[in-house]
Image: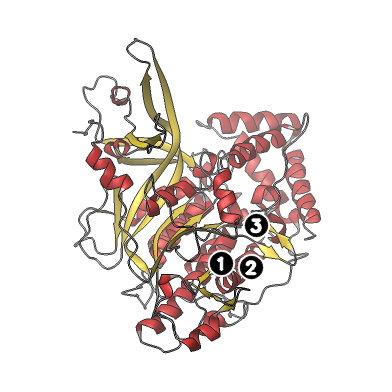
Amino acid sequence: MVNQNPLTPQEIANLFVAVPPAPPNTFELALVLGGTVSAGAYTAGVIDFLIEALDVWTTRRDANDPTAPRHNVVLKLITGTSGGGVNAAIAARALAFDFPHIVRSTPLAGDDSGNPFYNVWINRLKLADFLGTSDIEQKSLVSILNGKPIDDGANYICAFTNSKPRPSRSYIADPLRLILTVTNLRGIPYRTKFGNSALSETFVDHADYCRFAVVYRNNPIQPRPDELVLGFDDARLPSAIDWPSFSTFAKATSAFPLGFPPRALVRPTEHYRYRVVVVPSDQPGTLATVVGRVPDWASLVPSGASEVPADYNFLSVDGGATDNEPIALAHTSLAGVLGHNPRDGTMANRAVVLVDPFAGQADLGPSGPCALPTMLGSIVSALTEQTRYDSQDLLLATDDDVFSRFMITAQRDGKTGGAAIASDGLGAFLGFACPAFMRHDYLLGRANCQEFLREEFMLPAANPIFTGMWTPVQETTHGIPDGNGGLFLPLVPLLGTAAVPESLDPWPRHALDPEIYRTAIEDRFKAIVEFEGSGGVISSSLAWIVSHFGESKVADFAINAMKKALDEAGLS
């Protein structure tokens, strides 16, 4: 029986307003991993280095190494969208194990580096496999590209383990919260009544998200009532979902509309009881209130049934289509719906860190009539760009005087954002065509994260987090003068291997000849057009294109687009 009662004031207070204060000498952290497509390799490099740096520092600190400052940093939450959601899912699994970190000099042979981030992005997500026809041969056509490489990558992560399980990472919250955004094609209905009249307005919300509690230490936990539990010991976590079920949510958040297969998801219907909205007060000087959003439960009763089903089934695509930068979800998890994190450097004790490969100049769409493929791409791009940022989030993340928001973005040789990464072309699909592009971006992510931790992710030494936790020698070693006679101290000091300067691959010119994909493109489109089954909009739309232009012309269009992207990026 689904609880259809509105949230009580106490439930709202407990779940959405009241947030325990950060413990003394502790800085709490939430990662926001934005949409990426193939530039997810950059974000993967960032996360790989962050884990290495935290591992080295906290291991030495917990062993009472005199070189390691003794304050605490706790990773409380990771939110992810699209390719960022994929990296969040990889992290959720990988953080239970030790694994090697990939630098430029790491000797690699074959397609198993031992590093789950590198293996997924560089070794498994390849255009040649996306152009395969195994899905069509199995009488399934739901997307322009074959989703099998994504399925294979998800299966690899579900099974990821090694001979060195890591029983404890003291910087990981117990449990670690994970939020993946999805675009819910079915949607959740809501009905708003107007006063005492019979008039009402119904709308359907498609911007959705799913909460998870990841448990590493197998301690009994009390999850939120709208969370699914992920664990590594099902016997001690009877409420846990299994990793293959979880992987479907990760595949859903990255299901680029039309390009990759949509995913069928199922979750408890009652989860949608736990959604709230902030209502401004109509009285000057009084606080806003938090009100539960009540679904139109009657609309969720199937035809012929008498009650709302316990499970809610829905089809989902890329979370980036409706929420590409889920900063608000991360912020409210740290501070509560009505709270805010201290922004002053001498008081800050929590922060949201946004990882976005594309921050910088955004490309404009077409100004006039254009070819159908270009128009379709522009529509998808417009939806994604429109949902990427809230203006307030951007202003806070880029304000040097705000120490509760930080951003890591691609930077190399004076270029920022998409211009600094090799995978940016063709709406960031170009990296899938060339592993060397994604490897370059992976190593750049590591280097940019190292620079961020050394030079930006800092607080004034006067912040109480550092009180009694740093020695004068440590301050001299790691501190940076603030220009006023004081010091900034890093929240994640770089020690051991994390202090070794990162080295980059050269800019990967001449690494891709688009002509190698001509036959595969022609074969894929021919198979789509000849598909006998329920291909729906995919088959009928592409059949129209191919019937007017032919497989060779479609291949010409795609290859010329790749060549143009290579020329613009200086990669040809």
Decide: is 156 above or below 165: above
Query: Nearest the camera: 26 or 275?
Result: 26
Query: What amino acid does circle 1 point to?
Result: Gly
Q: Is residue 29 left or right of residue 225?
A: right
Neighbor class of circle 1 (other Cα within 10 Å; few <14, some 14-19, many 20+) is many
Crowding at mark 3 (Cα within 10 Å: few <14, some 14-19, many 20+): many
Image height of 317 relative to 94, above or below: above
Please report contact status of discs 2 and 3: CB closer than 8 Å, yes or no. no
Residue at left offset 58%, top offset 32%:
539
* Residue, disc 2: 444
Q: Which residue is mark 1?
A: 45
> How far apart are the two marked residues, 3 and 1, measured between alpha carbons?
14 Å
Write the residue at 38% across / 70% down: 171
Can you identify the residue that label 3 sits on? Answer: 431
- Asked if one can make out residue 282 in the rendered structure from this viewpoint, the answer is yes
Dot 1 and dot 2 residues touching (CB under 8 Å): yes
